[in-house]
Image: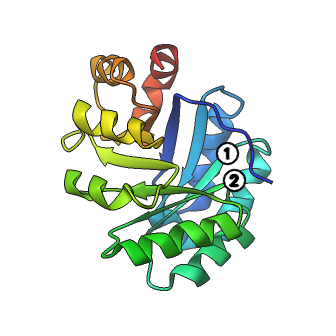
Amino acid sequence: MIRRISFPHVQLSLNFKDVEDAKELVRAIKGKPKVVLEASAPLIKSEGMICVSLLREEWPDAFIIANMGFLSDIDLECEIVAEGGADGMIASHFKSTEDLKAFIRGCEKGKLLPYLDIDSPDAITMVKEVKPYVIILHRETLSAEIVNKAKELGIKVGVRGIKELEEVRNWVEKGVDVFVIGKDMVRSLDVFLETV
């Protein structure tokens, strides 16, 4: 069963090495509406997929996305993330449309929402044929044109690297759905949530 998720929202990247540090932060912000948790690639590499279960113990109703980065064995890693209890999965650096299709199939099989982290605006051409649920780009790469193209394809758009509240307002007006922030921005979380 896929948990409900509303847009727009703030996606908090739990960029920690130790899951206890991540859990401490989750305890401080749990229950806030419009917040999604991202188990970062460093956290998963350090602690394993068990970190998703441990985060869920702190916030049972949280929507949790596992950021797996580059996938070396797409089917197996989708299966691992699904069995680990995540609701969505982020992957990046796909070299071919076939690999991207395999990722989407693996997510569908595991009842995961597929998120694609894109490092180049040219990658939007790859997702025309195979539609992930969300594409995420860095603020320096994202443009209103990309947002519009994604919307035409029925794909949600996220942005990483936001530092200023004015940027959030600007991207909300342009139709961005997901605002990915790191732990260093948590002090501004309530203000971000008011804007989103």
Separation of marks 1 and 2 at Cα, in angstroms: 10 Å
Residue tagged 1 = 63
Quadrant housing the N terminus: bottom right
Q: Position of residue 39 (x, y in %)?
A: 55, 57
Would residue 129 be found to the left or right of residue 18 on screen? Answer: left
Task: Give the residue drawn at x 71%, y 61%.
Answer: 111
**Mark 1 or mark 2: whose residue is earlier in sequence:** 2
- Element at badge 2? helix
**Front one among 153 and 169:** 153
Q: How is the image coloured?
A: rainbow
Residue tagged 2 = 55
| Residue 92 to residue 125: above or below | below
Q: Where is residue 84 in the image (x, y as percent from the top left)?
A: 71, 69
Total tally of numbered discs in the picture:
2
Amino acid type, mark 1: Phe
Amino acid type, mark 2: Leu
When asked about the image quadrant of residue 108, the answer is bottom right
Q: Nearer the viewer, mark 1 or mark 2?
A: 1
| Residue 114 to residue 145: above or below | below
**Front one among 183 and 71:** 71
Circle 2 crowding by C-alpha within 10 Å: few under 14, some 14–19, many from 20: many
| Residue 162 to residue 109: above or below | above
| Residue 117 to residue 189: above or below | below
Q: Can I make out residue 101 in this image? A: yes
Q: Can I make out residue 70 in this image? A: no
